[in-house]
């Protein structure tokens, strides 16, 4: 899932400064699971904002809504009837959801209330760890299910580097060397030959905005 965290409260207050009617919109998927921007977090943020506005000469009015996914246009339609009543939208979705909202409502400022941090896993309640950088060329089939791009400090597809030291990464003794982990996993699976496979220079598809159309949907995309 995409993991995010709420922006510092003072930064959010600065972002909405000058707007008199603000609609805070949550997203019911990734950011809800990681406790950053779901329905509950929308309620908490609006309550804090209302409280803080009591000292303002002209306090703003706040509305709230949460859609299933802000990165999906059909769900944005659900708040269509509300948007006209507000002069700014405070989005609690990930960066993709915020941008889709801004595209959907180009006449209204759409402001981020969360920082999108990484693609990761849920280790425990409130505890998340990064696992993928969406490199566009997944190596996990060769690397024993351990991501070299995310877990290696240098994102090496061919490792380890000369700094690997007693299972640790050279940048920090507390950080395991990704390529040591890959070696150990492959050895355990009897697939150690994989470690000799040389990855060619990666086509960093994530260096530009990408589009992905699943097979069977090309015609539909072309007709748009
Ligand atoms: S190799 Fe690329 S796609 Fe696969 S997990 Fe790592 S960053 Fe993600
Ligand atoms: S020591 Fe290991 S994890 Fe650290 S940069 Fe080198 S290969 Fe990557």
Image (tube, grey):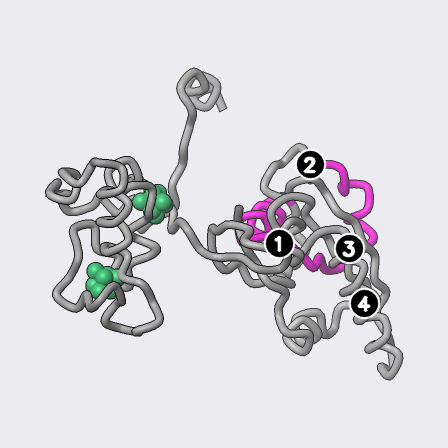
Element assignment for label 3: helix
Q: Which residue lies under the disc numbered 1?
A: 34
Instruction: Using the rendered image of the protein, determine whether residue 106 is visible from the camera's viewpoint.
Output: no
User: Residue 85's x, y, as percent?
Assistant: 83, 53
Decide which of tag 2 and tag 1 comes sooner along the chain.
1
- Give percent across and percent down for residue 218: 41, 20
Q: Which mark sits nearer the N-terminus, 3 or 4?
A: 4
What x and y, as percent, mark residue 102?
60, 51
Q: Quadrant of ligand 1?
A: top left
Location of mark 4 (residue): 20
Which mark lies nearer to you, 2 or 3? 3
Along the horizontal axis of the image, is 30 left or right of 41?
left
Q: Residue at x 76, y 37 (%)?
A: 78
For label 4, the SS is loop
Res 8 quadrant in image: bottom right
Disc 1 on helix, strand or loop? loop
Q: Residue 127 magenta-drawn?
A: no
Q: Are marks 2 and 3 in contact (CB under 8 Å)?
A: no
Image: 78 above or below 36:
above
Q: Are marks 4 and 1 in contact (CB under 8 Å)?
A: no
Give the CA separation, mark 2 to mark 1.
Answer: 20 Å
Compare marks 4 and 1 and give the one earlier in the sequence: 4
* Marks 3 and 4, how far apart at CA: 23 Å
Residue at image position (34%, 55%) is 150
Of the pair 160 and 185, the residue shown nearer to us? 185
């Amino acid at each position: 899932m995409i993991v995010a965290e709420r922006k510092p409260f003072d930064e959010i207050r600065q972002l909405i400064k000058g707007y008199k009617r603000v609609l805070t919109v949550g997203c019911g998927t990734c950011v809800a699971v990681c406790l950053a921007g779901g329905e509950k977090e929308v309620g908490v943020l609006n309550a804090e904002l209302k409280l803080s506005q009591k000292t303002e000469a002209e306090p703003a009015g706040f509305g709230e809504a949460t859609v299933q996914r802000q990165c999906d246009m059909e769900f944005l339609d659900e708040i269509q009837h509300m948007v006209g009543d507000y002069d700014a939208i405070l989005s609690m979705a990930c960066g993709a959801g915020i941008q889709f909202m801004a595209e959907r409502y180009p006449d209204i400022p759409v402001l981020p209330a969360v920082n999108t941090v990484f693609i990761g896993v849920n280790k425990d309640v409130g505890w998340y760890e990064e696992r993928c950088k969406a490199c566009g060329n997944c190596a996990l089939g060769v690397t024993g299910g351990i991501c070299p791009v995310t877990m290696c400090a240098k994102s090496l597809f061919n490792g380890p580097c000369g700094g690997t030291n007693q299972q640790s990464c050279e940048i920090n003794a507390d950080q395991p060397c990704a390529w040591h982990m890959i070696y150990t996993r492959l050895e355990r699976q009897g697939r150690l030959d994989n470690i000799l496979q040389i990855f060619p220079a990666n086509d960093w598809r994530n260096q530009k905005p990408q589009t992905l159309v699943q097979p069977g949907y090309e015609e539909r995309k072309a007709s748009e």
